[in-house]
Amino acid sequence: MEVDEGIGNTPTNPLEIEEERHFRRIVCAFKYYKKNSLARINKTEAYLASLPEHHQDMLLKYKQHLGVIKQCIEKNEKIINHIIKDVDSMFANVHPDNADNHYSNINHLSMSSEFERVETTLKQLVRDWSAEGAKERLMCYQPIIDEVLKNFPPNQCDPGNIKVLVPGAGLGRLAFEIARNGYQCQGNEFSLFMLFASNFVLNGIRSTNAYEVFPWIHQSNNVLKAESQIRGVLFPDVNPSDLPPTSQFSMAAGDFQEVYVDSDHWDCVATCFFIDCGHNIVSFIETIYNILKPGGVWVNLGPLLYHFANIPNENSIEPSYEVVREVIQKIGFLLEKEDTNVSTTYSSNQESMLQYEYKSVFFVCRKPALRQNGLNHFEQSSLEPDDIIAPDTVS
């Protein structure tokens, strides 16, 4: 898989300095995963040791279970070391010679949200790249893949000439599957957590079930059986290098609206749990419309979680789907298919006592084709190597 990277020199302007600081903070969250995770277990063990002895005697199995969780943390640490092995040279954000000093100067006590994102990344490995995640992928990815195949059938066109963009690609499995069907596919991701982990899977693994992760050890609530919390999950369930020889698959790092500015460029945009990730959903929809070719297709599945809705000092609008639907049509899309009651889950622990389920919206929209002499015309062209987008910076 090709990865488009921003390459540059030592940051000098305020924006570059802030991007470097953000990069260091994310790497630091990975580096201190073990220390932070063990500290929480140690705190629990200390409290357990302060309980009356007869209480401790009744909780002997629980005490032993905490010891097993520590062992699982050690094993997760090995996965994390693989994930961040080359990140200091992956982008032009941190000079390796000074990296350790930079990370040691960061206040780890203020990084609770970043540590949670590391734990989320471990669960994302299950969703995207394990046999256990197949059920979720069938719910969330397969309807999108089916629509791509329906709108651009391989027996009626050359899929190698069909350009498909997957914004918010996460760890890349949806984009990978579209590319595996022969289409030109580029995933786009803004999160460094996702970019680091996807780079490890897509570029660093060449076999199936090569690693084992313990994604549920940090979920101490609603545990029915102790063994459910400490069970390991093998990944990846497929060889990430198993793509057709003619496949064109890449991942582009950067802000979706900053990276994709060329009009009439993509045959299809496929979004899954994505359009609610921005401050202004209308701007996202406008961008999708702009980058699609006339006659191009937008396939979407997901809820409206609105990621910035409850974050202090962040602006956000949260219109209902009813309003979003009107916006989609006002911008110019033709709504061809719609289902407002699609059951989906996200990184769900199948053995937890608590199960979340979204009633997601699935729709297919089309940008109207050009009209000449009363006829519709939709020109399909191939992606030349020079067209691959390489953003200057990663943030």
Image: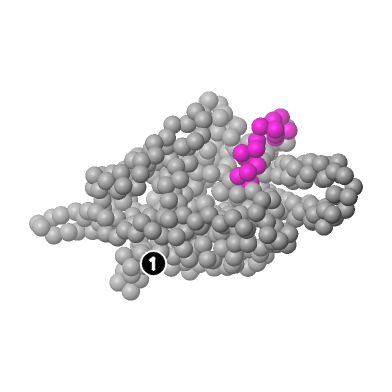
Q: Residue at x 47, y 49 (%)?
A: 168
Task: Classify mark 1: residues with Cα within 10 Å, few (<14), some (14-19) or many (20+).
Answer: few
Residue 150, placed above or below residue 334: below
**Residue furthest to the left:** 373
The disc labelled 1 sits on which kind of residue?
A: Asp
Residue 77, placed above or below residue 261: below
Q: Within the image, what quadrant is residue 158 found in? A: bottom left
Q: Within the image, what quadrant is residue 208 found in? A: bottom right
Q: How is the image coloured?
A: one colour
Residue 373 appears left or right of 368: left
What is the span of residues highlighted in magenta in the rendered image? 102-118
Q: Residue at x 39, y 67 (%)?
A: 146
Could you tell me residue 185's position as x and y percent?
43, 58
Q: Nearer the viewer, residue 335 or 5?
A: 335
Q: Residue at x 79, y 41 (%)?
A: 43
Query: Is 117 within the magenta?
Result: yes
Residue 69, placed above or below residue 104: below
Query: Is 365 within the magenta?
Result: no
Residue 269 visible, this orientation: yes
Q: Nearer the viewer, residue 124 or 164?
A: 124
Residue 267 visible, this orientation: no
Could you tell me residue 47's position as x and y percent?
81, 41
Q: Residue at x 59, y 62 (%)?
A: 350
Q: Within the image, what quadrant is residue 382 found in? A: bottom left
Q: Which residue is mark 1?
A: 146
